[in-house]
Image (cartoon, grey):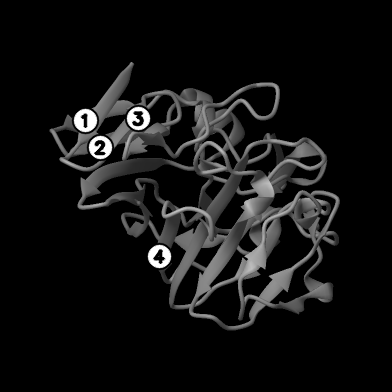
Amino acid sequence: MAVTIQNDYLQATIVEKGAELTSLKANGIEYIWQADPAFWGRHAPILFPFVGRLKNDQYTYKGQSYPMNQHGFARNAVFALIEHSAEKAILELASNEETKKIYPFDFRFMVSYEVWGEGLRIRFEVENTGQEEMIFALGGHPAFNVPLEEGLKFEDHYFAFSPQKTRVKIPLEGPFANLDQKTLGQTNTSIKITRNLFANDALIYETKGLNTFTIASEDSVHRVTVAYNHIPYVGLWSPYPKEAPFVCIEPWWGFADTVDSSGKLEEKAGMNRLAPEQKFKTQFSITVN
């Protein structure tokens, strides 16, 4: 089932599977990638309770081993639509017998979409409904059509960053993070979007405070911006070497296993911890023009 929210400028469509944003339209333009499986069969999946890949697609917790696919299970789960108005939709996923087989925590996970002006606000709320500390990661993975309009090429676009400053870059070795090889990424200036930019998979940066990441072109008035405050990481990705006509800007509260990961959830880097009966709330926005 799909639900639509809209105002005079913007229209967004969300489906119950994965609580995934499948369309974002304004100015007669579709900004969200339309999931052609020849390149990548998703639009904007939500990553929970893991971001990235785990070694051997599994982890251990309190000595017990659990299987877990890349980016967790929420992107394939069916959420319940619990609120829907003209400009807002809220969807919910709660732990159940099936989730407990692969993730031994009790939780309630709510995703809210709301249109405002030229933007879409996405809110996440994770509630620990169990009796022990909950360990989790969380992420957005929206893919945006590039080029932004007909007549332009993929390479006619660039990333713009605000604030313009260097950010710590986390390199990947295969699908795993190498924290010992962190460098300074030159996000103090714009970066031309090319295929080779993604030759080593996603570009991952540590982010602090208020950040905006924009895809734009000097040959177009149209652009798309992801903005947030106090989210620790962002991934920029397009599937190399495929010549896929989209680019992702991904706010993350966590990342993949490290190259030296023990596989123990209790020791996994980048994870969030939530006490019983407590809630974790965060948000990011997408604006288009």
**Disc 3 residue type?**
Ile
Q: Position of residue 186 (x, y in %)?
A: 69, 78
Residue under numbered circle 4: 228
Q: Earlier in the sequence, mark 2 or mark 3?
A: 3
Marks 2 & 1, CB-CB < 8 Å contact = yes
Whole-number angstrom distance, CA of label 2 to CA of label 4: 20 Å
* Image disc number at residue 90: 2
Q: Where is residue 111 in the image (x, y as percent from the top left)?
A: 33, 42
In what element is the residue under mark 4? strand
Q: Quadrant of residue 153?
A: top right
Of the two numbered discs 2 and 3 in the rendering, the one whose residue sits closer to the viewer: 3
Q: Earlier in the sequence, mark 2 or mark 4?
A: 2
Identify whether 136 is placed above or below 76: below
The residue at the point 37 percent across, 24 percent down is: 16
Q: Tell me the quadrant of the picture where the N terminus can be found.
A: top left
* Image disc number at residue 82: 1
Q: Earlier in the sequence, mark 2 or mark 1?
A: 1
Residue under numbered circle 3: 14
